[in-house]
Image (cartoon, grey):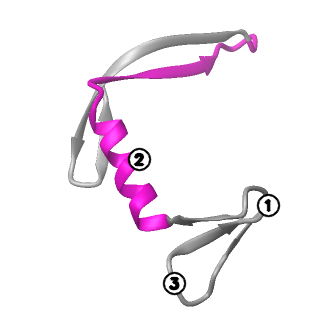
Amino acid sequence: MSKETANDTTVNDTTRNNKVDIAEFTNQFIDFIDAFDSLQLATVDKDGMPEASYAPYVKLGNDYYIYV
């Protein structure tokens, strides 16, 4: 269970007794996403059957555009 502190950007992870720096985590997350040129897109059809495929995407600023 995590609890965000009111006066900084850390989260106290009580299950592991350590703090997570939200800004650093966000930067690492963005770097991870930017390392790929495509994404996995999972949907369901009209009968509820799952479908998954990859699709290329482009990031412009903070927006992502998926080519399908």
Which residue is at the front of the view, 10 or 61? Answer: 10
Percent across and percent down for residue 64 are 32, 42
- In the rendered structure, which amino acid carries the disc numbered 1? Met
Residue 33, label in figure? none
Q: Give the magenta-colored segment's residue range.
A: 22-48
Percent across and percent down for residue 62 are 29, 54
Marks 1 and 3: in contact by CB < 8 Å?
Answer: no
Residue 68 in view of the camera = no
45 relative to 61, above or below: above
Q: Residues within 10 Å of mark 1 (few under 14, many from 20)?
A: few
At x 77% / y 64%, what residue is drawn?
A: 14
Which residue is at the front of the view, 49 or 15? Answer: 15
Percent across and percent down for residue 30 are 34, 47
Q: What whole-number distance in Å separates the C-alpha atoms at marks 3 and 1?
A: 18 Å
Q: Does dot 3 land on a helix, a strand or a loop?
A: loop
Q: Which residue is mark 3?
A: 8
In which quadrant of the rendered view does residue 36 lie? top left
Q: Residues within 10 Å of mark 2 (few under 14, many from 20)?
A: few
On-image quarter of the C terminus: top left
Q: Which residue is mark 1?
A: 1
Magenta highlight on residue 40: yes
60 relative to 16, above or below: above
Which residue is at the front of the view, 44 or 28? Answer: 28
Q: Residue furthest toward the bottom?
A: 7
Q: Which residue is mark 2?
A: 29
Magenta highlight on residue 47: yes
